[in-house]
Structures are given as C-alpha cells and as structure tokens.
Image (cartoon, helix red, strand yellow):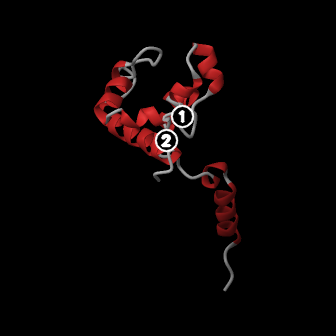
Amino acid sequence: MKTPRLSLLAALSFLLSPRAALPAEPKIERLWKVHCTSCHGADGRGNADMAKEVGVDAKLLNLGRPEAAGITRDQKRERLLKGKEKMPAYEPKLKPEQVEPLLDLSIELAEAIRGKK
C-alpha cells in the first residue's frame, strides 16, 4: 500500500522542524536559567566570572559547598525570597507556586555536587 506523498512530506516537514527536534524544556529549568544560572551556573557549581564581577568569593556561589549543607530549607527559601548580602531578592520576580520547585532543583543540584544523588 502506498503512502500518499503529501502525508509523507508533511511528516518529514514536522520531524525536521526545529520545534520538533528540541524537547520542551520544563518550566523550572527555564526559571533556573533565567534567574540563577548567571551566578550559580547551570549545574549549581557557581560562576567564577560573576563572583569576580559582584565581588564575592567564588566558593559562595557553589550550592554544593560543604558549609552550605547545614543551611535549612527554610533558610534557603528566605534567601531566595528576601535576598542576602549580594544575592538579590526574588520574591517580586517569582510566583508563589514557583518557589518550592525552584528550591527543590537547587537542593538536587547541591546534593549532586556533594555526590548524594
């Protein structure tokens, strides 16, 4: 049985389109890229260039640094929303339903750096 030529062309066109080639990026990863990557890096290990630019020790931008393991989830939430020292407050930029998933992602990255995931 022959496949109609138009259907085959339409299927190929869809498969080769840039939209079909790239999987949809989850919303929280997009938020991470927009708000967090410039300082903490895509993997949470920190961005040394940004640390230099804002005048902080590059180690402070690494979410997996050993001394960060003692920071509670509540403290992390407070820092995210209200800011601390050079970290800006993100409360005005985030919707309430985005806060916990963004915290989850930051904690997952920190645990991965520490080798716990």
Q: Three-letter amino acid code at disc 1? A: Lys
Image quadrant assignment for residue 100 = top left
- x, y (%) of residue 57? 57, 20
The front one of 16 and 54 is: 54
Mark 2 lies on residue: 29
- Name the residue rendered at 61%, 49% in the picture: 19
Q: Secondary structure at mark 1?
A: helix
- Disc 2: CA contacts within 10 A as few (<14), some (14-19) or many (>=20): some
Callout 1–callout 2 Cβ contact below 8 Å: yes
Q: Using the image, determine if residue 36 lies above or below residue 14.
A: above
The N terminus - image quarter: bottom right
Q: Three-letter amino acid code at disc 2? A: Glu
- x, y (%) of residue 99? 34, 34
Outermost residue, front side: 67
Mark 1 lies on residue: 33
Q: Using the image, determine if residue 44 lies above or below residue 84.
A: below
Q: Using the image, determine if residue 111 lies above or below residue 69.
A: below
Q: Which mark is residue 106?
A: none
- Name the residue rendered at 52%, 44% in the picture: 113
